[in-house]
Amino acid sequence: MKNAKKISTTIMLCAMIHSFGVMGQEETEVKDNSTFNLSGTVDTYFRSSFSKDPAAPYTSFADLNGFALGMANLIVSYEGEKSGFVADLVFGPRGSNAVFGSVGNSSEMVNQLYAYYTIDEGVTITLGNFNTFLGYEVISPAANFNYSTSYMFSYGPFSHTGLKADFTISDDISLMLGVFNQTDQTEANYDRYTAFGAQLGLYGQFINFLGGEDYAQIDFTGGFDLGDSFFLGINATTASLAGDTGFSGIALYPQYTASDSFAIGLRGEFFSETDGFGALVSEGDADNFSLTLTGSLSSGNFMLKPELRIDTCSSEIFAISPSETSDRLSSFLVAAIYSF
């Protein structure tokens, strides 16, 4: 009898332990569906132009002289089963240029800050501040092939604060609809200006629209694999403002991947502004053509990017010495980027 009771007790204990083990495993599997991540980049560079004065192209980033700082980028994100958030903070000159529209000191380091919720399969709602959906290039130096940026990117929007809905219609078709504050105002709608945006994605090609009071921009962003190692990116855009001023442009991005550690790419951009838009000249019309040749050497999380750039403008906009201006500017830089 005593042995029978011991055997019975042992069987019960084993069953209880197995039961708790299964419950613990199920709870663990549920928790594993949610992820918390910390990522980002650090970049720095050296830049010089082949002129008496170290002039820079009239673009947003990589425009400082000598040994210069880019930015530190810290991204904290949480992805749950149906919802999550992204807090994207930037520090340094490149970060300050990226959030130039911030008014309050508390938001001068906020590149993105948004929360999202998936209300149904293929339908996600996002509220907050997020980087623009227009254009081929982005703020992150690790996500761009060229380190310096194009004129189309520099004078288009950087970010939007508002509400957007993303619809995944199929594996190859997507749609985004959104309503935003004035472009690049991070904290709030100070000017009571409302913008509307839309993006249609078709087989990896994207047609974008942004419009509001006295402003409209249509943008195409895409690219094609022309072989196992060759890719051609494309960006074309046109924007019009009140008073018939505005800009337009087109850029091609051929890129060749030679190995896992080395790639080379070219950006050829034609940029045109009308009626003194202000990107190139304050009055009249102006055109600029630029060629940017970039190499990318990578080892693990580290990238080294040497870059040669030539800008040619229809007006003498580049101050190449204290007393001279020129319609042409050649410059060289080398950038170091670390991603984590």
Image (spheres, grey):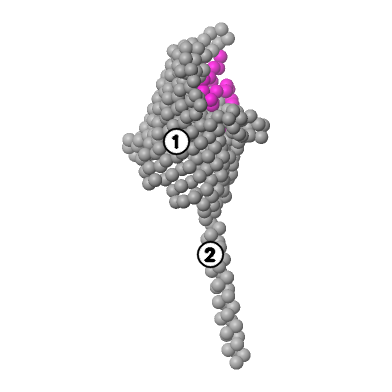
Q: Main secondary structure of the magenta part?
A: loop
- Image-based side of 181 in relation to 208, left or right: right
Q: Furthest residue to the top?
A: 323
Q: Residue at x 51, y 26 (%)?
A: 213
User: In the rendered image of this protein, does residue 15 appear above or below residue 285?
Assistant: below
For residue 51, above or below residue 36: above
Q: Which residues are magenta?
A: 48-72
Q: Which mark is in front, 1 or 2?
A: 1
Residue at screen point 52% across, 10% down: 325
Q: Position of residue 48 (x, y in %)?
A: 53, 20
Q: Which mark is residue 26?
A: 2
- Quarter of the image containing the N terminus? bottom right
Which residue is drawn at the image coordinates 55% and 29% (left, top)?
A: 193
The image shows residue 171 at horizontal and vertical percentages of: 38, 46
Which quadrant of the figure contains the C terminus?
top right
The residue where tag 1 is placed is 198
Instruction: Tell me which residue sits at (39%, 45%) in the image.
Output: 169
Q: Callout 2, which amino acid?
A: Glu
The three-letter code of the residue at mark 1 reads: Ala
Instruction: Specify the label residue 2 is tagged with.
Output: none
Of residue 27 and residue 183, the one placed in the foreground of this image is: 183
Residue 37, image x, y percentages: 56, 47
